[in-house]
Image (spheres, rainbow, N blue to C red):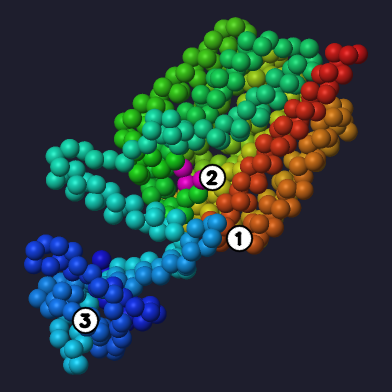
Amino acid sequence: MPAVGREHLEKLAGYPFVVVSWVDPNGFPMSVATDFTVDSGLGVVTLRAPAGDEAAIPVDRQIDVLGSHIRPTPGQGYDERRYLQLWGSASAGPDGSMTFTPTRAWGWDEGEIPFFEYSERSVPQSRRYLAQLSKEKGRTIRPRLSLGWLFLRTTRLPFLSATAVPVLLGIAVAARGGAFNPWLALVTVVGAALAHLAINVSNDIFDTLSGADEANVNPTPFSGGSRVLLYDLLTLRQLIALAAALFGGAVAIGLVLVWATRSATLLGIGLAGIALGLAYTAPPLKLVYRGLGEIAVAIGFGPIMLLGSYVVQTGSLSWEAVVASVPVAILVALILYVNEIPDRVGDAAAGKRTLPVRLAPRVVTGIYLAFAVLAFAVVVGGVATGLLPVATLLALLAAPLVVRVYRGLTQFYSQPYALMPVMATNIKIHAYVGVLLLAGYGVAILARLLA
Protein backbone atom coordinates (compact mmCIF):
# COMPACT_ATOMS: atom_id res chain seq x y z
CA MET A 1 0.00 0.00 0.00
CA PRO A 2 1.64 3.28 -1.07
CA ALA A 3 2.75 6.04 1.29
CA VAL A 4 0.85 9.31 1.16
CA GLY A 5 2.15 11.92 -1.25
CA ARG A 6 1.10 15.38 -2.28
CA GLU A 7 -0.93 13.94 -5.18
CA HIS A 8 -3.11 11.96 -2.76
CA LEU A 9 -3.95 15.02 -0.68
CA GLU A 10 -4.66 17.10 -3.77
CA LYS A 11 -7.07 14.43 -4.97
CA LEU A 12 -8.75 14.31 -1.56
CA ALA A 13 -9.34 18.07 -1.77
CA GLY A 14 -11.65 17.42 -4.72
CA TYR A 15 -14.27 15.71 -2.55
CA PRO A 16 -17.00 17.81 -0.87
CA PHE A 17 -16.75 15.92 2.44
CA VAL A 18 -15.11 12.85 3.94
CA VAL A 19 -16.21 9.95 6.11
CA VAL A 20 -14.00 9.28 9.14
CA SER A 21 -14.03 5.71 10.51
CA TRP A 22 -12.48 3.95 13.48
CA VAL A 23 -13.07 1.13 15.96
CA ASP A 24 -14.20 2.17 19.44
CA PRO A 25 -12.81 0.65 22.69
CA ASN A 26 -15.64 -1.91 22.72
CA GLY A 27 -14.79 -3.13 19.24
CA PHE A 28 -17.70 -1.45 17.46
CA PRO A 29 -17.09 0.26 14.10
CA MET A 30 -17.80 3.98 14.15
CA SER A 31 -18.02 6.50 11.31
CA VAL A 32 -18.99 10.12 10.86
CA ALA A 33 -19.15 12.48 7.88
CA THR A 34 -17.48 15.84 8.26
CA ASP A 35 -16.07 18.84 6.42
CA PHE A 36 -12.34 19.18 5.93
CA THR A 37 -9.51 21.20 4.45
CA VAL A 38 -6.21 20.01 3.03
CA ASP A 39 -2.71 21.38 3.48
CA SER A 40 -0.71 19.40 0.92
CA GLY A 41 2.45 21.32 1.83
CA LEU A 42 2.36 20.15 5.45
CA GLY A 43 0.88 16.79 4.49
CA VAL A 44 -2.10 17.05 6.85
CA VAL A 45 -5.89 17.19 6.71
CA THR A 46 -7.86 19.40 9.07
CA LEU A 47 -11.16 17.79 10.07
CA ARG A 48 -14.07 19.70 11.55
CA ALA A 49 -14.91 17.99 14.81
CA PRO A 50 -18.46 16.56 14.73
CA ALA A 51 -20.94 17.56 17.41
CA GLY A 52 -21.51 15.21 20.33
CA ASP A 53 -19.22 13.08 22.45
CA GLU A 54 -20.39 9.79 20.95
CA ALA A 55 -19.02 10.75 17.54
CA ALA A 56 -15.77 12.27 18.82
CA ILE A 57 -12.86 11.39 16.56
CA PRO A 58 -10.30 9.52 18.70
CA VAL A 59 -6.67 10.57 19.06
CA ASP A 60 -5.41 7.33 20.59
CA ARG A 61 -5.90 4.91 17.69
CA GLN A 62 -5.75 4.59 13.93
CA ILE A 63 -8.52 6.20 11.92
CA ASP A 64 -9.23 6.26 8.21
CA VAL A 65 -10.55 9.09 6.10
CA LEU A 66 -12.55 8.27 2.98
CA GLY A 67 -13.56 10.48 0.07
CA SER A 68 -15.97 8.88 -2.38
CA HIS A 69 -17.94 9.89 -5.47
CA ILE A 70 -20.35 8.08 -7.78
CA ARG A 71 -22.88 9.33 -10.31
CA PRO A 72 -26.00 7.28 -11.06
CA THR A 73 -27.07 7.12 -14.70
CA PRO A 74 -30.74 6.03 -14.91
CA GLY A 75 -31.23 2.88 -16.91
CA GLN A 76 -27.50 2.25 -17.28
CA GLY A 77 -25.90 2.03 -13.84
CA TYR A 78 -23.17 4.31 -12.56
CA ASP A 79 -20.19 6.25 -13.83
CA GLU A 80 -17.58 8.73 -12.57
CA ARG A 81 -16.76 6.29 -9.79
CA ARG A 82 -13.78 7.15 -7.64
CA TYR A 83 -12.63 6.94 -4.04
CA LEU A 84 -9.58 7.69 -1.93
CA GLN A 85 -8.94 6.20 1.50
CA LEU A 86 -6.23 7.43 3.86
CA TRP A 87 -5.07 5.79 7.09
CA GLY A 88 -3.29 7.55 9.92
CA SER A 89 -3.79 9.26 13.27
CA ALA A 90 -5.48 12.44 14.48
CA SER A 91 -4.56 15.03 17.06
CA ALA A 92 -6.54 17.87 18.62
CA GLY A 93 -6.23 21.16 16.76
CA PRO A 94 -7.35 24.73 17.42
CA ASP A 95 -11.02 25.68 17.66
CA GLY A 96 -12.05 22.10 18.29
CA SER A 97 -10.78 20.88 14.93
CA MET A 98 -8.76 17.70 14.41
CA THR A 99 -5.46 17.45 12.56
CA PHE A 100 -5.19 14.19 10.62
CA THR A 101 -1.76 12.98 9.52
CA PRO A 102 -2.07 10.18 6.93
CA THR A 103 0.58 7.50 6.53
CA ARG A 104 -0.99 5.18 3.93
CA ALA A 105 -3.30 5.65 0.96
CA TRP A 106 -5.38 3.55 -1.40
CA GLY A 107 -7.84 4.59 -4.07
CA TRP A 108 -9.25 4.30 -7.53
CA ASP A 109 -10.50 6.73 -10.16
CA GLU A 110 -12.55 5.37 -13.05
CA GLY A 111 -11.34 8.25 -15.18
CA GLU A 112 -7.77 6.94 -14.84
CA ILE A 113 -8.32 3.18 -14.71
CA PRO A 114 -11.50 1.60 -16.18
CA PHE A 115 -13.50 -0.54 -13.78
CA PHE A 116 -12.70 -3.83 -15.53
CA GLU A 117 -8.98 -3.10 -15.51
CA TYR A 118 -9.18 -2.12 -11.83
CA SER A 119 -10.89 -5.44 -11.12
CA GLU A 120 -8.14 -7.33 -12.93
CA ARG A 121 -5.40 -5.44 -11.11
CA SER A 122 -7.10 -6.44 -7.85
CA VAL A 123 -6.95 -10.18 -8.63
CA PRO A 124 -3.54 -10.80 -6.96
CA GLN A 125 -4.76 -9.04 -3.82
CA SER A 126 -7.94 -11.15 -3.84
CA ARG A 127 -5.91 -14.33 -4.20
CA ARG A 128 -3.71 -13.36 -1.25
CA TYR A 129 -6.82 -12.66 0.81
CA LEU A 130 -8.36 -16.05 -0.01
CA ALA A 131 -5.05 -17.79 0.72
CA GLN A 132 -4.85 -16.13 4.14
CA LEU A 133 -8.51 -16.89 4.83
CA SER A 134 -7.94 -20.53 3.87
CA LYS A 135 -5.02 -20.68 6.29
CA GLU A 136 -7.10 -19.22 9.11
CA LYS A 137 -10.07 -21.53 8.46
CA GLY A 138 -7.96 -24.64 7.93
CA ARG A 139 -9.63 -25.45 4.60
CA THR A 140 -9.30 -24.31 1.02
CA ILE A 141 -11.57 -21.41 0.14
CA ARG A 142 -11.86 -20.61 -3.56
CA PRO A 143 -14.30 -18.78 -5.82
CA ARG A 144 -16.92 -20.99 -7.42
CA LEU A 145 -19.10 -21.12 -10.51
CA SER A 146 -21.85 -23.59 -11.30
CA LEU A 147 -20.62 -26.52 -13.38
CA GLY A 148 -22.41 -25.31 -16.51
CA TRP A 149 -21.06 -21.76 -16.35
CA LEU A 150 -17.61 -23.04 -15.45
CA PHE A 151 -17.53 -25.34 -18.49
CA LEU A 152 -18.77 -22.54 -20.73
CA ARG A 153 -16.11 -20.16 -19.46
CA THR A 154 -13.27 -22.67 -19.44
CA THR A 155 -13.85 -23.95 -22.96
CA ARG A 156 -15.07 -20.61 -24.37
CA LEU A 157 -18.02 -22.48 -25.82
CA PRO A 158 -19.57 -19.49 -27.67
CA PHE A 159 -16.55 -19.41 -30.00
CA LEU A 160 -17.65 -22.72 -31.52
CA SER A 161 -19.13 -20.70 -34.37
CA ALA A 162 -15.57 -20.60 -35.71
CA THR A 163 -15.81 -24.39 -36.11
CA ALA A 164 -19.46 -24.68 -37.09
CA VAL A 165 -19.09 -22.42 -40.13
CA PRO A 166 -16.28 -24.30 -41.97
CA VAL A 167 -17.50 -27.77 -41.00
CA LEU A 168 -21.08 -27.17 -42.13
CA LEU A 169 -19.85 -25.42 -45.25
CA GLY A 170 -17.65 -28.39 -46.14
CA ILE A 171 -20.66 -30.68 -45.75
CA ALA A 172 -22.74 -28.33 -47.93
CA VAL A 173 -20.09 -28.27 -50.68
CA ALA A 174 -20.09 -32.07 -50.68
CA ALA A 175 -23.90 -32.21 -50.71
CA ARG A 176 -24.00 -29.96 -53.76
CA GLY A 177 -21.99 -32.62 -55.55
CA GLY A 178 -24.42 -35.31 -54.42
CA ALA A 179 -22.48 -36.74 -51.46
CA PHE A 180 -24.20 -36.56 -48.08
CA ASN A 181 -24.26 -38.99 -45.17
CA PRO A 182 -26.18 -37.47 -42.22
CA TRP A 183 -24.61 -39.75 -39.60
CA LEU A 184 -21.08 -39.02 -40.73
CA ALA A 185 -21.98 -35.32 -40.83
CA LEU A 186 -23.21 -35.40 -37.23
CA VAL A 187 -20.14 -37.25 -35.99
CA THR A 188 -17.91 -34.80 -37.87
CA VAL A 189 -19.53 -31.80 -36.20
CA VAL A 190 -19.11 -33.34 -32.73
CA GLY A 191 -15.49 -34.32 -33.37
CA ALA A 192 -14.56 -30.90 -34.73
CA ALA A 193 -16.25 -29.20 -31.76
CA LEU A 194 -14.29 -31.33 -29.28
CA ALA A 195 -11.04 -30.54 -31.09
CA HIS A 196 -11.80 -26.80 -30.99
CA LEU A 197 -12.63 -26.87 -27.27
CA ALA A 198 -9.49 -28.91 -26.55
CA ILE A 199 -7.36 -26.35 -28.37
CA ASN A 200 -9.02 -23.51 -26.44
CA VAL A 201 -8.24 -25.16 -23.11
CA SER A 202 -4.65 -26.06 -24.04
CA ASN A 203 -4.02 -22.51 -25.24
CA ASP A 204 -5.22 -21.21 -21.88
CA ILE A 205 -2.81 -23.53 -20.10
CA PHE A 206 0.23 -22.34 -22.05
CA ASP A 207 -0.79 -18.66 -22.00
CA THR A 208 -1.15 -18.81 -18.22
CA LEU A 209 2.14 -20.64 -17.72
CA SER A 210 3.94 -18.15 -19.98
CA GLY A 211 2.59 -15.20 -18.00
CA ALA A 212 0.70 -13.74 -20.97
CA ASP A 213 -2.71 -13.86 -19.28
CA GLU A 214 -1.42 -12.46 -15.99
CA ALA A 215 0.30 -9.58 -17.80
CA ASN A 216 -2.95 -8.72 -19.56
CA VAL A 217 -4.98 -6.44 -17.28
CA ASN A 218 -7.45 -5.50 -20.02
CA PRO A 219 -9.26 -8.76 -20.83
CA THR A 220 -12.59 -8.57 -22.60
CA PRO A 221 -15.28 -11.18 -23.35
CA PHE A 222 -13.51 -11.68 -26.68
CA SER A 223 -9.87 -11.62 -25.65
CA GLY A 224 -7.58 -12.41 -22.75
CA GLY A 225 -8.47 -16.10 -22.38
CA SER A 226 -10.83 -17.78 -19.93
CA ARG A 227 -8.66 -16.81 -16.90
CA VAL A 228 -9.98 -19.74 -14.87
CA LEU A 229 -6.47 -20.45 -13.59
CA LEU A 230 -5.82 -16.83 -12.67
CA TYR A 231 -9.11 -16.67 -10.78
CA ASP A 232 -8.46 -20.05 -9.06
CA LEU A 233 -11.69 -21.43 -10.49
CA LEU A 234 -9.77 -24.54 -11.54
CA THR A 235 -6.36 -25.97 -10.73
CA LEU A 236 -3.73 -26.58 -13.38
CA ARG A 237 -4.16 -30.32 -12.93
CA GLN A 238 -7.91 -30.05 -13.52
CA LEU A 239 -7.39 -27.95 -16.64
CA ILE A 240 -4.83 -30.40 -18.04
CA ALA A 241 -7.24 -33.27 -17.36
CA LEU A 242 -10.03 -31.44 -19.20
CA ALA A 243 -7.78 -30.72 -22.18
CA ALA A 244 -6.69 -34.37 -22.30
CA ALA A 245 -10.30 -35.57 -22.17
CA LEU A 246 -11.36 -33.23 -24.97
CA PHE A 247 -8.36 -34.15 -27.11
CA GLY A 248 -9.02 -37.82 -26.41
CA GLY A 249 -12.64 -37.49 -27.52
CA ALA A 250 -11.64 -35.62 -30.68
CA VAL A 251 -8.96 -38.19 -31.57
CA ALA A 252 -11.34 -41.09 -30.93
CA ILE A 253 -13.98 -39.60 -33.22
CA GLY A 254 -11.32 -38.80 -35.80
CA LEU A 255 -10.16 -42.42 -35.82
CA VAL A 256 -13.76 -43.60 -36.20
CA LEU A 257 -14.19 -41.32 -39.21
CA VAL A 258 -10.90 -42.50 -40.74
CA TRP A 259 -12.00 -46.10 -40.26
CA ALA A 260 -15.45 -45.39 -41.74
CA THR A 261 -14.07 -43.59 -44.79
CA ARG A 262 -10.81 -45.56 -45.21
CA SER A 263 -9.27 -42.21 -46.16
CA ALA A 264 -5.56 -41.56 -45.70
CA THR A 265 -6.24 -37.97 -46.77
CA LEU A 266 -8.58 -37.50 -43.81
CA LEU A 267 -5.97 -38.96 -41.45
CA GLY A 268 -3.40 -36.48 -42.72
CA ILE A 269 -5.80 -33.56 -42.33
CA GLY A 270 -6.67 -34.61 -38.79
CA LEU A 271 -3.05 -34.99 -37.70
CA ALA A 272 -2.19 -31.63 -39.24
CA GLY A 273 -5.06 -29.99 -37.39
CA ILE A 274 -4.05 -31.36 -33.99
CA ALA A 275 -0.39 -30.48 -34.54
CA LEU A 276 -1.31 -26.96 -35.62
CA GLY A 277 -3.63 -26.47 -32.65
CA LEU A 278 -0.95 -27.49 -30.15
CA ALA A 279 1.81 -25.56 -31.90
CA TYR A 280 -0.27 -22.39 -31.68
CA THR A 281 0.82 -21.68 -28.09
CA ALA A 282 2.77 -24.76 -26.98
CA PRO A 283 6.57 -24.83 -27.05
CA PRO A 284 8.79 -25.18 -28.93
CA LEU A 285 7.01 -23.56 -31.91
CA LYS A 286 4.62 -21.20 -30.05
CA LEU A 287 3.40 -19.82 -33.38
CA VAL A 288 1.31 -17.01 -31.91
CA TYR A 289 4.37 -15.73 -30.02
CA ARG A 290 6.18 -15.37 -33.35
CA GLY A 291 3.46 -13.39 -35.12
CA LEU A 292 2.22 -16.50 -36.96
CA GLY A 293 -1.00 -16.99 -35.02
CA GLU A 294 -3.22 -15.59 -37.75
CA ILE A 295 -1.78 -17.96 -40.35
CA ALA A 296 -2.23 -20.93 -38.00
CA VAL A 297 -5.84 -19.99 -37.24
CA ALA A 298 -6.61 -19.35 -40.91
CA ILE A 299 -5.33 -22.79 -41.90
CA GLY A 300 -6.86 -24.61 -38.94
CA PHE A 301 -10.32 -23.05 -39.04
CA GLY A 302 -10.40 -22.70 -42.82
CA PRO A 303 -8.99 -25.42 -45.07
CA ILE A 304 -8.40 -28.05 -42.39
CA MET A 305 -11.91 -27.89 -40.92
CA LEU A 306 -13.71 -27.42 -44.24
CA LEU A 307 -11.66 -29.90 -46.26
CA GLY A 308 -11.82 -32.40 -43.43
CA SER A 309 -15.62 -32.39 -43.35
CA TYR A 310 -15.69 -32.45 -47.15
CA VAL A 311 -13.39 -35.48 -47.33
CA VAL A 312 -15.52 -37.34 -44.77
CA GLN A 313 -18.44 -37.09 -47.19
CA THR A 314 -16.64 -37.55 -50.52
CA GLY A 315 -13.36 -39.32 -49.78
CA SER A 316 -11.42 -36.84 -51.92
CA LEU A 317 -10.45 -33.19 -52.32
CA SER A 318 -11.74 -30.60 -54.80
CA TRP A 319 -10.85 -27.09 -55.90
CA GLU A 320 -14.36 -25.94 -55.05
CA ALA A 321 -13.86 -26.93 -51.42
CA VAL A 322 -10.46 -25.23 -51.34
CA VAL A 323 -11.84 -21.96 -52.72
CA ALA A 324 -14.87 -22.09 -50.39
CA SER A 325 -12.51 -22.38 -47.43
CA VAL A 326 -10.51 -19.24 -48.25
CA PRO A 327 -12.99 -16.46 -47.28
CA VAL A 328 -13.85 -18.35 -44.10
CA ALA A 329 -10.15 -18.75 -43.31
CA ILE A 330 -9.43 -15.06 -43.82
CA LEU A 331 -12.37 -13.89 -41.72
CA VAL A 332 -11.64 -16.23 -38.80
CA ALA A 333 -8.01 -15.08 -38.83
CA LEU A 334 -9.25 -11.49 -38.67
CA ILE A 335 -11.20 -12.37 -35.51
CA LEU A 336 -7.94 -13.31 -33.81
CA TYR A 337 -6.19 -10.34 -35.38
CA VAL A 338 -8.68 -7.79 -34.01
CA ASN A 339 -8.91 -9.53 -30.64
CA GLU A 340 -5.13 -9.20 -30.26
CA ILE A 341 -5.34 -5.40 -30.39
CA PRO A 342 -6.56 -4.86 -26.79
CA ASP A 343 -4.15 -7.58 -25.61
CA ARG A 344 -1.06 -6.04 -27.18
CA VAL A 345 0.37 -4.43 -24.00
CA GLY A 346 0.13 -7.63 -21.98
CA ASP A 347 1.29 -9.72 -24.93
CA ALA A 348 4.36 -7.53 -25.38
CA ALA A 349 5.20 -7.87 -21.68
CA ALA A 350 5.02 -11.66 -21.98
CA GLY A 351 7.13 -11.77 -25.16
CA LYS A 352 4.14 -12.58 -27.33
CA ARG A 353 5.11 -10.82 -30.59
CA THR A 354 1.74 -10.71 -32.31
CA LEU A 355 1.20 -8.49 -35.33
CA PRO A 356 -0.52 -5.70 -33.31
CA VAL A 357 2.51 -5.77 -30.98
CA ARG A 358 4.95 -5.48 -33.88
CA LEU A 359 3.13 -3.02 -36.14
CA ALA A 360 1.95 0.59 -35.91
CA PRO A 361 -1.81 1.19 -35.46
CA ARG A 362 -2.26 2.58 -38.98
CA VAL A 363 -0.59 -0.49 -40.47
CA VAL A 364 -2.68 -2.84 -38.32
CA THR A 365 -5.97 -1.26 -39.36
CA GLY A 366 -4.85 -1.10 -43.00
CA ILE A 367 -4.05 -4.81 -43.02
CA TYR A 368 -7.47 -5.54 -41.54
CA LEU A 369 -9.26 -3.64 -44.29
CA ALA A 370 -7.16 -5.19 -47.06
CA PHE A 371 -7.77 -8.78 -45.96
CA ALA A 372 -11.45 -8.23 -45.22
CA VAL A 373 -11.91 -6.93 -48.76
CA LEU A 374 -9.90 -9.90 -50.06
CA ALA A 375 -12.28 -12.34 -48.35
CA PHE A 376 -15.24 -10.96 -50.28
CA ALA A 377 -13.19 -10.71 -53.47
CA VAL A 378 -12.48 -14.46 -53.26
CA VAL A 379 -16.23 -15.14 -53.21
CA VAL A 380 -16.72 -12.98 -56.30
CA GLY A 381 -13.74 -14.63 -58.00
CA GLY A 382 -15.02 -18.10 -57.13
CA VAL A 383 -18.38 -17.34 -58.71
CA ALA A 384 -16.75 -15.72 -61.76
CA THR A 385 -14.64 -18.83 -62.39
CA GLY A 386 -17.57 -21.18 -61.87
CA LEU A 387 -16.07 -22.84 -58.80
CA LEU A 388 -18.70 -21.44 -56.43
CA PRO A 389 -22.45 -21.31 -57.08
CA VAL A 390 -23.86 -17.91 -58.05
CA ALA A 391 -26.06 -17.86 -54.95
CA THR A 392 -22.98 -17.61 -52.71
CA LEU A 393 -22.82 -13.94 -53.72
CA LEU A 394 -25.32 -13.56 -50.87
CA ALA A 395 -22.21 -13.34 -48.68
CA LEU A 396 -21.62 -9.83 -50.00
CA LEU A 397 -24.57 -8.66 -47.89
CA ALA A 398 -22.24 -8.73 -44.87
CA ALA A 399 -19.61 -6.53 -46.53
CA PRO A 400 -20.87 -3.18 -45.11
CA LEU A 401 -20.00 -4.42 -41.62
CA VAL A 402 -16.33 -4.30 -42.59
CA VAL A 403 -16.54 -0.52 -42.84
CA ARG A 404 -18.06 -0.34 -39.37
CA VAL A 405 -15.27 -2.45 -37.89
CA TYR A 406 -12.56 -0.48 -39.69
CA ARG A 407 -13.93 2.83 -38.42
CA GLY A 408 -14.24 1.43 -34.90
CA LEU A 409 -10.64 0.20 -34.93
CA THR A 410 -9.43 3.58 -36.12
CA GLN A 411 -11.41 5.46 -33.48
CA PHE A 412 -10.95 3.20 -30.43
CA TYR A 413 -7.63 1.48 -31.14
CA SER A 414 -6.15 2.34 -27.72
CA GLN A 415 -9.36 1.87 -25.71
CA PRO A 416 -9.73 -1.87 -24.97
CA TYR A 417 -13.24 -1.72 -23.55
CA ALA A 418 -14.54 0.66 -26.21
CA LEU A 419 -13.35 -1.95 -28.72
CA MET A 420 -15.72 -4.61 -27.39
CA PRO A 421 -18.62 -3.71 -29.75
CA VAL A 422 -16.11 -3.58 -32.61
CA MET A 423 -14.84 -7.07 -31.78
CA ALA A 424 -18.42 -8.34 -31.54
CA THR A 425 -19.23 -6.93 -34.98
CA ASN A 426 -16.08 -8.49 -36.42
CA ILE A 427 -17.16 -11.90 -35.11
CA LYS A 428 -20.58 -11.34 -36.68
CA ILE A 429 -18.96 -10.79 -40.08
CA HIS A 430 -17.47 -14.29 -39.97
CA ALA A 431 -20.75 -15.80 -38.76
CA TYR A 432 -22.92 -13.90 -41.24
CA VAL A 433 -20.69 -14.72 -44.20
CA GLY A 434 -20.72 -18.37 -43.14
CA VAL A 435 -24.51 -18.45 -42.87
CA LEU A 436 -24.94 -16.62 -46.19
CA LEU A 437 -22.52 -18.99 -47.94
CA LEU A 438 -24.49 -21.91 -46.49
CA ALA A 439 -27.69 -20.28 -47.73
CA GLY A 440 -26.12 -19.93 -51.17
CA TYR A 441 -25.24 -23.59 -51.20
CA GLY A 442 -28.71 -24.42 -49.96
CA VAL A 443 -30.15 -22.64 -52.99
CA ALA A 444 -27.72 -24.50 -55.27
CA ILE A 445 -28.59 -27.87 -53.70
CA LEU A 446 -32.31 -27.17 -54.03
CA ALA A 447 -31.85 -26.18 -57.67
CA ARG A 448 -29.98 -29.43 -58.29
CA LEU A 449 -32.74 -31.49 -56.69
CA LEU A 450 -35.45 -29.74 -58.69
CA ALA A 451 -33.58 -29.96 -61.98
Q: Amino acid at mark 1?
A: Phe
Whole-Å distance between the Cαs marked 1 and 2?
16 Å
Q: Is residue 286 left or right of residue 409?
A: left
Whole-Å distance between the Cαs marked 1 and 3?
51 Å
Across and down, in percent, residue 26 comes to 8, 63
Front residue of this view, candidates 427 and 133: 133
Residue occupied by mark 1: 412
Whole-Å distance between the Cαs marked 2 and 3?
53 Å
Kindly state the secondary structure of the residue where label 1 is placed.
helix
Q: Amino acid at mark 2?
A: Phe
Residue occupied by mark 2: 222
Residue occupied by mark 3: 51
Is residue 355 part of the magenta span, yes or no? no
Q: Is residue 370 left or right of residue 222?
A: right
Q: Residue at the spot x=58%, y=15% of the render?
A: 187
Q: Residue at the spot x=66%, y=57% of the render?
A: 408
Mark 1 / mark 2, whichever is N-terminal: 2
Residue 44 shows in the view: no
Across and down, in percent, residue 69 comes to 40, 70
Q: Is residue 436 left or right of residue 200?
A: right
Mark 2 / mark 3, whichever is N-terminal: 3
Front residue of this view, candidates 338 and 109: 109
Q: Name the quadrant of the N terminus.
A: bottom left
Residue 443 shows in the view: yes
Across and down, in percent, residue 39 comes to 29, 88
Across and down, in percent, residue 378 comes to 79, 37
